Structures are given as C-alpha cells and as structure tokens.
Amino acid sequence: MTVSDQEDLVAVAPAAPVVTAAPVTSMRAGREALYFARRNRKLVAGLTVVLLFLVVAIVGPLLTDHGPNEYVGPPAQRPSSQYWFGTTMFGQDVFAQFTHGLRSTFLVGLLGGGLAAFIGMLIGFTAGYRGGVVDEVLNMITNVVLVIPTLAVLLVIATYLRVRGVIPEAVFIGLFSWPWVARAIRAQTFSLRSRDFVDLARLSGASGRKIILREIAPNMSSYLFMTFILLFGGAVLIAATLDFIGLGPTEGISLGLMMNNAVLWSALPLGMWWWFVPPGLGITVIVGSLYIMNVGLDEVFNPKLREM
Amino acid sequence: MRNKLRLLIVLSVVSLLAACTGGGSDTPSTGQGQGTGAAPAGTYPRNETLYISGTQWGPPNSWNPITDWQYATGTEGLVYENLFLFDPLKNEYKPWLAESGDWTSKNVYELKLRPGLTWSDGKPLTSADVVFTFELGKFETVPYHNLWSWLDKAEAVDAQTVRFTFSEPLYQQWGNHLYNRPIIPKHLWEGRDEKTVATGANEKPVGSGPYLYQTHSQDRMVWVKNDKWWGKTALNLDPKPKYIVDIVNSNNNAALGLVLQGGIDLSNNFLPGIATLVKGGYQVQTYFPEPPYMLSANTAWLVMNTAKKPMSDPAFRKALAYSIDVNKIVNGVYGQIVRPANPTGLLPNWDQFIDKSQVNQLGFKYDPAQAKKLLADAGYKNTGGDSFLEGPGGAKIELNLIVPNGWTDWMESIRVIGESARAVGIKVNTQFPEYQALVDARNKGDFDLLINNEKQVSNSPWEYYDYMFRLPVQDTQSVANFGRYENNKAWDLVQQLDKTPVDDVAAMKKVTSQLQKIQLTDMPVIPLWYNGAWAQANTSVWTGWPSAKDGDSHYAPVTWRNWLELGGILTLTELKLAEAK
Amino acid sequence: MSAVSLRVENLRVWYRTLRGDVQALDDVTFAVADGEIMGLAGESGCGKSTLGKSLIRLDGRMRYVDGTVELDGKELPIWDTGKMNGFRFREVSIIPQYAMSAMNPTRKIGKLVEDLLESRGVGFAGMRAELDRRLELVELSHDVLDRYPIELSGGMKQRMVMVLSTLLNPSLLIADEVTSALDVSTQKAVAETLVGFRDRGFVKSMIVITHDVSLVYQIADSIMVMYAGKLAEKAPTDVLVDAPRHPYTQLLISSLPEVGVKYADKRLTGIPGTPPSLLRPPVGCRFRDRCPLAFEKCLEEPPFVEIEPDHFVACWKAS
Amino acid sequence: MRRYFGRKLLIYAVTFFVAVTVDWMIPRFMPGDPIQTMLSRASLRPEANQALQAYYTNVFGLDLPVWRQYLNFWTALLHGDLGVSIWLFPQPVTKVIMRAIPYTLALLVPAILLSWFAGNKFGAYAARRKWLDNTVLPVGYVLTATPYMWLGILLAWLLATVAGIFPIAGGYSFALEPAWSWAFIGSLLRHWFLPFASLFLVGFGGWAIGMRNMIIYELEADYAHYLESLGAPRRLVRRYAFRNALLPQLTGLALQLGVIVAGALVTEIVFSYPGLGYLVLQAINNQDFFLIQGAFLFIIVGVLLANFLVDVVYVMVDPRTRTGMRGGS
C-alpha cells in the first residue's frame, strides 16, 4: 500500500509533502535545514503572515474595550477611523468581531489540527510498527472513517448538541479528520521499520513505544510537522463551513459565524461588504499562507526541490 | 487530453439535462394544470404575474385545507374559502361565502350562504358542503374535533341555510371558526377515510376560490386565476394577476435582493434593513411610510416558568418586567419596524378592550431603579459577593433565557434582555438551543425564561387570555400557558369571556378589565413588543398596495397562512398594473 | 594504443550551492583511446561521478566553467543541453548508478524502449531484431518487453538498462557504479558483459566509474585516480596497481592488502584528516595536508604530466 | 487484484453498515420529540394536539421497541424507503431528496471533473516554468485556501447583486415552467453557472497546485534523469511525469470527495440552489430528522460509489495494482 499512501498524502492537500526518506536527525542536517529555512522565501513569507494574524488575534481584542457582540456604534456604518472595519446591522464593531473571530479560528486550528494529528500518529505508528492483525483492524477503521464525509457526521453531531462552544467544535473536527494522516504515517513507519537503526534499537531490547518515540518519530519529525500544518488549515476550513451553516458556536463569535450573520442579515443586497469580506479574507489568507509555508518547508527538508 | 476535455463538456451537458428533467419531473408538464395552462411554453408574462414570498417555508407538499399547519399557503384563501373574512384593522367580519349569520337564540346560530356559489369544477356550493365540512370534525384527528364537545349538531335547513345547535355556545371560539374553517366540497371528499382526510396531501385541490392550482416545484408554488370565480359577480371583486408565483423562502439575501430588483412584488418576509431601503428610492413600499412601517401581527412574550423559583414570585416577575429595555430592542435590533407592546400585551386592534386607567396605574415600563427597588423590597439581596442578587433565602439566582438557534432577530433581542436583567442584578444567561430541543423543554416546563409569540391576531382577545391562563396545567403544555401559571379565578374569567357574545363588547370589556388587573399585578408573562405583519411591496409592476395613507385601501397586505382570510385576499383584488414608464 | 577516442582538456565543472561554488572538477585533462576501458577510481566526493555526468548531462546544479571535450574529433557542446541531445545515446551513453529505478514504473519496458527510440527518430520495428539479439546476449527472454520494471529482479533490471543504453552503439559509454547495488557473483557477470560489449563493438570506449578498485582491475585497460576534484594519476592498469607514483594512489592501493576484496571508499584509516572542502579549495596540491611526503613546493599546484608513456601523475615528488 | 477489490468492497460494506446504523440513530436520539415539533407549528387546542400526537407517533412507528425499529429501518431501506418527511409531511423522504439530487449532481459532476482535469493540465503545464509558476502558485494557493461559501458570497455579490449579470437565487427563472425550450435550458444554465464557478475555482486551484508539486517530484525522479541522459526530448519526459503524477491526484480525488460534497452543500446554500445541500439546511432548520437521515444516507452512498469508481479507474491506470504487486515499500 505504501506507494499509493505516500501519494495519497501528496494529493490530499495540495501543499502536502512527499517525504524523502532522508532522516534529518544529525545536528549538521538540523543546522543545514535552519540555514535553508532562513533563505526560503515561501517559508519566510508564509510564516510572517501567519504570525502577523496570530498577533492580531492576541492583541486585537485588547484594543477594543467592548465585547464582539455588544452594540457599540450606529448600525451599518462603513469603515471609519472609529470603527476600522465598520459596524454590523446592530452596530456591533466588525473589527472587534474579526479579532475575536481570529482567536477562535486559531483555537480551532490548533485544537482540531492537534487532536487529528495526535490520533493520526497514534494509529499510524501503531499500525505501521506492529503490522499484522493490529494493522488490519486499524487500517479498516481508518478506511471507514476516511470514506464517511466528515461534514455529514459533524452536521448530525452539531444538530444534536443543544448549546455549542468553539472547543467542542474543534474537538469533533479533530475526531474526524485524522484518517489520511494515519494512512500516510503508517506507510512511512512501514518503510522505516526495516531500517537498521530501528533493528539495532530492537536488538538492544527497547520497547515498541520507545522505538517509535525515539527512533521512528524523530526521523519523520519534519514530515509530522508539515502534516500538522495541513490539518490546521483543514480544521479551520471545516469549522468555517459548519459555522456558516449556522451549526457553529452558539456562544461567542467566529469568522464563519460572521459570514453566516452577514448573509442572514442580507449584507449583500444592502452592500455591507465590510461585514462579509474581512472574515472570509482572514481565513483565506491564513490557510493560504500555511499552505505556502508548507511548500517552503518541503523544499527545506527535501534538497531535490531546492531551486538554486 | 483535448478529447478528454471534450468528453467532459458532453458530461456536464448531460448532467445539466439531468437537472432539467429532474427539475421538471415533479411538476405537471406545461398546460396540464387543471386544464388552464394558458401559459405559452410555460412562461408567465410579467404583467400578468404576481410574485410573492415569505409565506411558504418549504417545498409545497400538501394542499389539504384540514392540516392548516402544512398545506401550501394559499390553499386556504385562494382555493378553499371561508364563510367570513375577519378584518383585524376594523375588527369586523366580512361576509364571504356566507351572506349573513345570526344567533337566533342563545344556542342556535343560523347561517345564510350566498346564492350562486360554485366550486371550480362547476358544481354548486351549498349548505350541504358546509355541514359536511363541520362534520368532518367528528374525526378524532381533525384539528377542530373539539368543536363537537360543545357543538351539538349542524343541519342544512335549505340549500342556502345551515343551522348550528350548540350544547354550550362558546361565542368567542365560534367567531373564530366562522372565518377559520375552509369549506370543503362534499361531492369530492365524501367517503375519504380518516387518514386521507387528516393527513392526505390532497394533490390537485378543487375549491371555490379565485385561484386554481397551476404547478409547483421545490422552490415555488404557482396559482392560476379561476376565471369562473363566483366572487366576480357576487362580490364584484376581480384579482388582477393571472398568475401568482409564491416563491419559497430562501435566505434573506435572496429575498431582499429580489424585492429590490423587482423580482418579488410582495415579500412577507422579515427583511432586516428594510427601514433604510423604504427611503432609498427602491420603489419599495410598506404599510406605514414611517416607523413602525408594519402592522402588528402578534405579541412577543417573555414566558417565565412560574413553577420554578424565583419566577414563582410575582414581585420578581414584575421586577424583571421593569428591568427590560424594550426600546433598545425595537431600535437596535429591529430598526423600528416593530413597536413596543402595551403592558397588557393586547394588539392595537384590541385597543378598545384595554382598561387605560387601570394600565396607567398598574402597568410597568422600563425603569431599572424601580426594578431594583422591587427586588430589594421582596428581599433579593446580593449576598454572594458577585455583582448579582441572591433570593430571599440566599439561594443563588442564575437563569437561562432561550430562543431557537437561527432565529436571528430573537437571538439578538435576548442578548439585550440579558444585559438589561444583569444591569439590575438578575443573572440571566442567553442560550440558543435548536428549535426542537426548545419546544421539548418548553412543553415539559424544563426551562427558566423563553420568548414566544405563537398566538396571532384574531377576532377576540379571548385567544390571548386563553393562552395566558389556560388550566389545568398538564405535564406537557403544548399550546398554551407555557409558564404553568395557576390561577383559577383568572381561568374562570377566561371561560366566562368565551361564553360572552362577540357583539356584547361592554360585557367583554368588563371581563377583560378584570383579567388585565390580574395580569398586571401578577405578571404571569411579560409582553415585550408587537412583531410586525412583515410586508414589503415593490411598486414597479403592481401598485394599489394597501397602506395607511387615506385614499389607499386599508387591509393587512399579508399572504401568510391564515392571513388571506384576515384581509390578504382583498389586497390582491385591489392591485393595479403600474403605468409603463 | 590506437587513435584517441575521447579527449578532455582543462575541464572545469562547478556545483552551484547557496554557499557558493563547489569546484567539483578542476582543470581536468586526459584522453581515452579507441577500444580503451578506463577505470575511474577515488573516494566518494572526489568528483568522479561529476566527471562522468558532465560528459553526458549536466544536472540542474552543475555549471560548466571552461575546458573542452572532444569525441572522435568532434567537440561535445556539453554546456548546451539542447545541442548535446544530438550526441546523447548515439555518441555518448550512460549506465546510471540508479539502474534499479531508471525505468518508468508505469510503462511496459517494450513501450518505454519504443517511445525512446521513436523520440530519437529511430524506428522501433527496425531495431527489434537487434534488440532481441542483445537481450539473448544478456540472457533476458524477449517477454521482458511486455513486463513492467517492477516485475523484474534487480539483476534483470541492471541488464535491461545495459542493453538499452548501448542499443545505438555509442562511441563512449559511461558506466557509473554499475555493480555497487549487486551481489559479488552478479557483479562479475556484469563486468564481463561490459567487456563483451566492447569486444563486440557495441561501444568503442568506456569509462567505468567505481570505488571498487578490484573491479576495474579485472576489466579496465587503464585506471585513472581522482582526488578532491583533480586528477591524481592515470596509468595502464598493471602499472598503476604495481607501481603507483602518486602518494595518494600508493596509499589507496596499499590499503587494499591484496587487490580485490576491499573498497577504497571508506576514509583511508592510515591518513589523518579528511579531503579539503571544495568550496574554497587550498592552493597548491590538494592532498598536501594529508600527504606524508608533503614539502614547501606542494604549495604550488603540481601539473598532471606524463612521466612515462601513458603514465600521468600530478605530484612534485613523482617527477 | 481480486484481493485488492475484495478488500475494498469489504471496507465499503463495513462503512455502509456503520453509516446506516449511525444514520438510524439520528432522529431517535436527538433531543426533543420530532412529532411534537411538527405539531407545535399548528396552533391547536390541547385535546386535538394529544390525539394527533398519538396518531403521528404511530404513523412514524416510533412506538415500537427500539430493536424492532432498527430492523424495520433496514427492511424499509432495502426497499428504497426512507420513511416520511416530518417537515414536508406527508411526502416520502426519498421523493423529496430525488427532486433535489439532479441539481446537486449537475453542480458536482462537472465541477469535480472539469476542475480536476483543467487543474491537472494547468498545474503540469506551469511546473518548472518560472514565470508561470510564480504566477500560478500564489493564485492556486489562494484559491484552494478559500472557503467555498466565501467565494460564493463574493461572486453572488459582485456578479449577481452589484452587476446583476447572473440571477441571485433559485434553480431556474421564477417566470418559467420546466419545458424543453431554449429559454428554460438557458435559464437553468444561468442559475447554474455561479455556484458551479465557485466550486470549480476552489477545486481548480487545489488540483493545479497538487499537480505542480507532483510533477516537480516526478521530473526529479531517476527515470526522468535517465531518459534525459539518453537525449529523450522534454516532451516525452513530461508526458511520463504527467501520467505518473496523475495517479496520486486520482487517489487525492477519492480522498477529497467528502470535502467537495461539503463544499457543494454550502455553495447551494449561498445561492439557494434547490439541491441537496439547500435541502439539508432546511431539514436542519426544521429539525426534520427523517429528512436529514435520508440526505445523510444519500451523501454517504454517493461518496462510497464515487470512491469505488475511482478505485476502478485507478486499477485501470496503475499497472502496479493490476500486476498485484502494489506497494511493498
């Protein structure tokens, strides 16, 4: 399976890395990676943008003395020096909503992406390393979850919950977006399992867990990181979709929710572009830069791709 | 690759065709709509077609006038007609199928039908049909079954006359039946079993009304004019539009967009921001040219679960009432297209039943200080150290105020209420459960506070008082008295009101004044604002829309379920084509 | 020996890296005669593969600096990928290190050959008979052509590639580490096949790049040793093995007790230090720091001179 | 190869079973009583309400023991019967969904296929062509990172609301009845275009990027270098690279299906396009769990079928699966 699985990973998300088996463990390689990282335009640019938004997400809310949903200003105001992004139908400060929305976006990304990465690795490593029946079973589970359309499931769960928050949302997203990771990691583990340094560890009587943590995982660290980035982006997009359908958090605010409200309160015919443009733009830019960052990383860890 | 691409074009075209046939599969092919498909190649000429929206909340799926919560709107009013109309603006019954009706004795009501009434299939409409219609109510699962617990018999005296004999005449309710029972053709429904009557879809409905079923699909319901309608001569009324296309509600964007572009002539949707657009030179018209723009359709109540502490304490309920800044909702959330409710909650058309002096003396208004005072006097103190009050026993107070998720205007509104309440020290959280969960909690009495507006404008304030005070309280309260407020005196008065003849206004006032006294002192529910009878008309194709201006007709320009018989139908007959510019 | 087939003069090829140019081939000058099989030996990173590649195709990061390459009197425009195409396969050909993965995994081998030939303007049908003959020669059945690479064993792939690379009878064949992936027994077979190709005239001359001195010892007419991007010594096989003149060659040979079994590839344990960085190579003899015989003259660069017929050395002590 | 398919089919079977079971639970384990919800829309007198409550509970078979309900669900399902919609009572769910399906397919099928082919072609073309690469990359990334509905909203706003070139909502003009007239088909196309475009664009970007990256890997592969050393023209090498790069893109397609469907759903919502997605939203807002149930099942079965289709195609194009020697690290 490994051939196709590697390929899966590439195809899953456009920016997905193909792992070059070259282990980046030794200090030299590490330093080298850093060296190229600093010189990789894609990586630097992507990272900068993401960090920029992160800062806005953290600092922004502190700049406003009012909550995102409070009626502070006159309704339907265009962007002005007082309300940078204008106000909503009810005179809520769009900028305040935007910054708070960014927070939940990052939260969902980290939590959802993180959880998915964790589950994916857990299953991927175990399946790949243990092989045999364990692998068969885990692989079956993986494939089942893989085929079921995530959103459909999330729809049902969301309708089930009476009151929803950002965190549960993130958790549920995480619970359903891990399969492709599991598959890819399983494939990688397969190929690493037979390497001599693993054999060596095995001979020296290290436990399976140790071997995975000490020998195998480090050899894929770069790759695992990239996977997490993709999951992050994915989680953000799914969350946006849910929120937009109106199954997002029933408390607080999020970028998807902003779009949802904008549409519900007919911002389009009323020409209140400042209401629905920022949230979508925010998501697009963040996720976009994450992807670009990923190509950068890929080039860094993968000498073949470096353009001289 | 190129050939692959070509293949794709083909593919997409194919799937498109699939869409066409699919889109069409559920509609009768052109011209077979009851043999009246005059529409050439299935197009509706703009100047013969009225586009309305805001009435149909899902694909049309039933034309059964019995199931009045799911039939395609227009089924009752356009196809099936009622004995009377009731005009809530003037508080008067307008004879429709019926020519007249009188109580010949305390418990006998005699109804005279107009001569020359016909069904759209040509058969005459006679008293037999009326009797048949009411007798359908003998089926357990027909919504008006309980009528027969106080109606003794209905008999056709002659072709035009029906005599109803009551075991216990409930005048107010009867008044409601008079304009709420669509009359059903006996010759077509005879022999239908209970299931078909109570739940059947009744495709291809045959009624007596000015319009006929033309076609429908997921996103529209199309009616075509019935040229043989009896009303033309008998009432000398003639609805102008040949076609009525009722566009199923999509999202506000689409709706408002279409209204502004003249794609919808009349939208009965709640369209945020309409206030700003009325002045925007969009040829958009509302009933009032200035706030509140809309007529009032029903009262939004704050329902408190009086079976729970502290809502069981009248003082607390009253304080809560004083704490709410309704104007902030009216202006902030609705942009003034609703108006604050009278402390009695009675709609403007029932103004005559409001005991003004009593209201001035007992009524509440937004007054945080007063709210604080009431709470303090009743022994609510802040002993918990936080900024919120505890009950007299020192019990923590934390209440959840709920409205259905997605009901955006209400969601925004309760945020305001929450703030107001917290401002006087009552800790109120806002939550937005899904509609179903809310209904469940509401009926089981498993809630603190919620907003409800299920009772619509009607012929009698009795409806409202029944809604407030109905007893006995059962473990599931599915239609009235959600607050589980128990007051036998009040309930007696309500029943007494029900038994008061509709024309004996003085007697009615006497009862309602007493009811209002109880309501204002005890505050079982808090009236908040009057939801509007949303109506935005675009005058670019059709004019003559009702409005408050003198010279214009004064009807509720609303085509909602059960509103055509409240004057909506007369709106249609008043329309004229706009002069081509 | 007879006429010169390949003549390389002052060839300089550098690698572009972010840190600067790595001078992998510096001022290389040598010749290969008609019918000669020249072994090219040296530690990994000494530039031997770079030399091999630069004779047929510079990859993305290699940069031609200067020097000339002549094959059968014609100059090879190795700096110009486009012009070079004309010579590849027909004049110069290569058996790459990665023969195991040299064939498109998703194409039947026969199809692959066909595509390639057609793309070079050679009719497949016309070649078919010859192809079959050569397959037999390397003991491959004809039906490999209907199979996918993944269905072949390592040895089979290796032989298939050898046949394919030499199909158009190139004048010069570069065999780059052809045996490193194989077990000893097949190594021998492969080596003999190479000789066979030469004897049958499929190829005129051959450069066999390897770190396995013992292999070239068996099949090569002459051996050339490289060190740190420069030529150290070139001489007829026996001369080089029996009487090496360059101290590096000497250490290289002596480190193999009896020619054959061991690889010169691993760092020479006898000599302290490592080869110099080719980013900024030291002036003078590049072997200086590790050379037991080093003396002040070594600060000047030693020329690659012919000290006796066909025996070239780059060392002040040797001359 | 038989083993390969056997395995796949087993997976699909299990998935289907799990999905159906989960699906069955939906209306039964949701908070609240669907029937009461339906009736709560009718302002009835209490007596009538109770009578109807009992009646409908029986109609929906919700009064049976749970295990019985489960079995009945399967038997009904195998007869293609998904029960009756509550919100659209008394319409059978299957009928309601079937009305919406063509619209969704008309969006999905062309959007998926066209964006996949076009994206791949373009990505392959852009790869390793400096200026194109530098323009395509950023655009592509922005596109794939765009939330479907946002792109939809933008298009709707610019082209429908502001410019008025395209209609705002609906599946075909409200002034038309379905008919085999050009007017009608034209109207269908005009309403179809924007939602299609937003699906297409997002997909296109993704595939273009994916292919671009894959091609670059392929061009660095050994076989590519070998061919070049033997003087094979760029055309041939690229042709091979493209062919090989298509395989992972194909698997990618299978993996993305779920996401694309989700995209279609929200896009439909933005344009209130009368397809499945719009229906699902309505079903959710009206808490019609039987309809949600049906839609959910349709989506899953659709995705399963599509997956299987991709598998078949994959086997046809990738010799490694056919020769039964797939993988083996």
Image (spheres, rainbow, N blue to C red):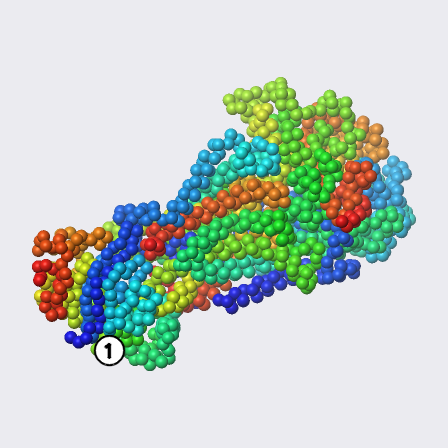
Secondary element type, mark 1 = loop
Q: Residue B162 appears at what percent x and percent y?
A: 88, 45
Bin the neighbour count of mark 1 within 10 Å (Cα to Cα): few under 14, some 14-19, many 20 and up: some
Q: Residue at (33%, 81%) from the top-left corner?
A: C129
Q: Position of residue C132 (x, y in %)?
A: 32, 79
- Percent of width and height locating residue C281: 20, 53
* Displayed quadrant of residue B340: top right
| Amino acid type for the residue under numbered disc 1 | Gly
The chain letter under disc 1 is C
Depicted B209 relative to depicted C259: above or below: above
Q: Which of D44 and B362 is in front in this view?
A: B362
* Rendered view: C32 above or below C126: above
Residue closer to the observer: C256 or C14: C14
Residue reaching furthest top?
B377
Q: Which residue is drawn at 81% across and 40% down?
A: B552
Residue annotated with mark 1 = C201
